[in-house]
Amino acid sequence: MKARIETGMIFFRRIDGNVDAQAESGDVVVSRSTESGNLRTVVGNVRIGMVGRHARLETDNGNIELQTAHGVVEANATEGDIDAGFATITGQSRIVTKVGNITATMNPSESFSIEAKACWEKVRNQLAIQTNKDGSGRRHLNGDYNGGGPLIELKASGGSVSINSDPYIDG
């Protein structure tokens, strides 16, 4: 499914397949995509409930919310917060905001490696991550969870990074 608009909101309820949606000014919202999602807006929020594979999410000025990811996540906000829930981790993911905070909620039964960095604020972590040499400090965290696995990169240049756990994220 594909949609492009200049001004206004794009909303898809359930897509059995891939979704590609872009708006210049307005929110892009997808309840559920069984495959991959490529969602972008210049000014507005990007929200997706569940994505079955690869999620590529981007906004210049707005927030990004991904409730449940079952695959790779690439999320980039120039000015805005990013909330991402990882149910299944299948490959390297990267979440970056220049001005904003990142909250990553992880399925505690998954295995992954993590590199988290907050340039101005703190990195907060609720998981038992085995840190690498020089892997933990007030503004950074590098290490492995459940023995390590695909790398999750989290970088908040002008905000904080929070790493949480939720065993019920598999929704």
Image (tube, rainbow, N blue to C red):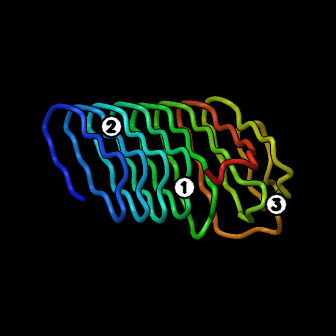
Mark 3 vs mark 1: which is more N-terminal? 1
Separation of residues labelled 3 and 1 (CA atoms): 26 Å
Mark drawn on residue 69:
1
Whether the residues at callouts 1 and 2 have beta carbons within 8 Å, the answer is no
Q: Is residue 131 left or right of residue 46?
A: right
Identify the image quadrant of the N terminus.
bottom left
Q: Label 1 is placed on what type of residue?
A: Ala
State the residue at coordinates (36%, 33%).
Answer: 45
| Residue 56 on image: x %, y % | 40, 56
Which quadrant holds residue 151?
A: bottom right
User: On the image, numbered disc 2 is attached to which residue?
Assistant: 60
Which quadrant holds residue 36?
A: bottom left
Q: Is residue 73 left or right of residue 136?
A: left
Query: What secondary structure is found at the residue carrying circle 3?
Result: strand
Query: What secondary structure is found at the residue carrying circle 1?
Result: strand
State the residue at coordinates (50%, 57%).
Answer: 73
Q: Nearer the viewer, mark 1 or mark 2?
A: 1
Task: Decide which of 41, 114 is in the foreground and name it.
Answer: 41
Mark 3 vs mark 2: which is more N-terminal? 2
Mark drawn on residue 132:
3
Q: Label 3 is placed on what type of residue?
A: Asn
Mark 1 vs mark 2: which is more N-terminal? 2
Task: Decide which of 43, 70 is in the foreground and name it.
Answer: 70
| Residue 17 on image: x %, y % | 35, 65
Q: Is residue 55 left or right of residue 125?
A: left
Whether the residues at callouts 3 and 2 have beta carbons within 8 Å, the answer is no
Position of residue 52 relative to residue 43, above or below, is below
State the residue at coordinates (25%, 40%).
Answer: 10
Q: Label 2 is placed on what type of residue?
A: Asp
Q: Residues within 10 Å of mark 3 (few under 14, many from 20)?
A: few
